[in-house]
Amino acid sequence: MSNTQQPAYQAYTVVKREGQDDYWLPIGTAFAHADGKGLNVLPQALPINGKLVLRSPKENGEQAAARETTNERPSRQRQR
């Protein structure tokens, strides 16, 4: 894996919040193997609910909320 390779996927955990949209917390990345037959997943944290969601990154490189095929909706980012 080269240092210039772009991640194939962004890893998220989806945090359920009562009365609010779900919060998609980015927790790592995944890189495709050179032969295209696997991935290296590089988590920076582990989901406490045991569910890791991999989504294709946006082309502009921004980390963004993503939709899964279930009814989960992207979060609205909090202003700090």
Image: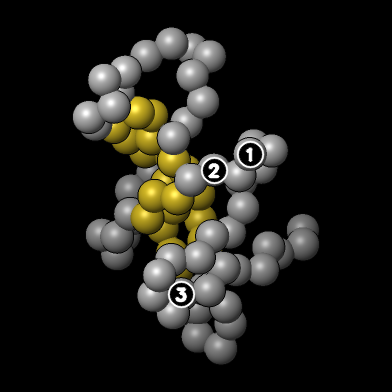
Residue under label 1, please give it: 59
Spatial separation of the CA atoms under disc 2 and disc 1 = 6 Å
Q: Which circle's residue, 3 or 2, is located before the other in the chain?
A: 2
The residue carrying pointer 1 sits among few (fewer than 14), some (14 to 19) or many (20 or more) residues within 10 Å by Cα, namely: few
**Can the viewer see residue 13 in this picture?**
yes
Q: Which residue lies under the disc numbered 2?
A: 57
Residue ID for mark 3: 72
20 w.r.t. 22: above or below: below
- Between the residue at mark 3 and the residue at mark 1, the CA separation in whole angstroms equals 22 Å
Query: Neighbour class for label 3 at 10 Å: few (<14), some, many (≥20)?
Result: some
**Amino acid under label 1?**
Glu
**Label 2 close to label 1 by CB (< 8 Å):** yes
The image quadrant that residue 20 belongs to is bottom right
Q: Residue at x 39, y 75 (%)?
A: 70
Q: Residues within 10 Å of mark 2 (few under 14, many from 20)?
A: some
Q: Position of residue 56 (x, y in %)?
A: 48, 45
Query: What residue lies at 69% left-to-right and 38% top-to-bottom?
Result: 60
Give the image location of residue 49, x and y in percent: 29, 64
- Label 3 sits on a secondary structure element that is loop
